[in-house]
Image: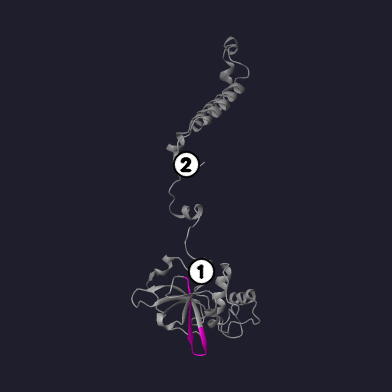
Amino acid sequence: MKLIEDWKQAWKLKSVQVGAMSAFFYALILFSEQFVNVWNTIPQDLKNYIPAQWQEYVGMFVGVAIVLARLKKQPELHEPELSGINSLLSVPVKTNDLAWMIEAKKHIGLKEVSGKAHNPTILNWLKSLGAWWSEDETAWCGTFIAHCLKVAGVKYPKHWYRALDYVNYGSKLTKPAYGCVAIKTRQGGGHVCFVVGRDEKTRKLVCIGGNQSNMVCYALYAESEFQEFRWYGMTDRPADKRYNLPIMTGVTATKVSEA
């Protein structure tokens, strides 16, 4: 049965009405039992007219009445519109975001650790992916992308630690789509990240990636900076709506180091 919207709708149910009246009746019985002395003052002749098992009779009557009431067609009930914190606790959060993008956004702000120590989260990614090294000094943009894809159950490149190897897998796109992998070359290697949207002012692409200034963050890139855009997903091509990139504001990281 669906949730009851309010007490007025609930009261339309015959079973609720009978149950409430029965509860009220029993309450009167319990209340009356507190006045034993009053009962004792009633003449015996009058008592003889009251069945000895009257409480059992009443209970049987109420039970039958509730069953009969439930046989009657009930009014249609509707789910309530929840708001505030209750909606967060009671209603599953629905989203059409891509699984790997959800994972990527969870790590915004994560930084590598300078010196001999290393970020344990990045080390866990490396271990899960089967890396033969365990430090965060090596460029880890490909590690971040592979981790997100793996969590989403999406295939990732064999040499996931090489940014430029991402051009050898997935499906090549003629233009960027939300959630696609963007690959670019840089001095001494390459860089890989996810396309998130387009900046409102500069019209540059907003991308989320790892090892962008030694952290997971958003950064702005000109579309022409990328060598290719590749689709890694459960399908060969993104849905058409993914090409309508969200317009974003407030992203100021226009220059990030990627080494």
Element under disc 2: loop
Quadrant of residue 48 within the rendered picture: top right
Residue 111: where, in percent of width, then height? Answer: 53, 78
Of all residues, the one furthest to the left in this rendering is 201
Kind of residue sitting beneath label 1: Asp
Relative height, residue 41 to residue 254 (above, below): above
- The mark found on residue 4 in the picture is 2
Residue in view at x 42 percent, y 66 percent: 240
Looking at the picture, tell me which residue is in the foreground, 94 or 237.
237
Please state which of residues 54 and 29 is positioned toward the viewer in this rendering. 54
| Front residue of 196 and 64 | 196
Residue 3 horizontal/vertical position (percent): 49, 43
- Residue pictured at 56% horizontal, 29% vertical: 67
Q: Which scheme is used to colour this image of the protein?
A: one colour
Report the magenta stretch's main SS.
Answer: strand
In the rendered image, the vertical position of residue 3 relative to residue 98, given as above or below: above
Q: Which mark is residue 236?
A: 1
Q: Which residues are magenta?
A: 179-190
Measured from the top left, where is residue 84 in percent x and y? 44, 54
- Residue reaching furthest to the bottom: 188
Residue 253: which numbered mark, if any? none
Instruction: Decide which of 235, 166 is in the foreground and name it.
Output: 235
Q: Amino acid at mark 2?
A: Ile
Instruction: Give the crowd class for mark 2: few <14, some 14-19, many >=20 residues within 10 Å.
Output: some
Of the residues under marks 1 and 2, which one precedes in the sequence? 2
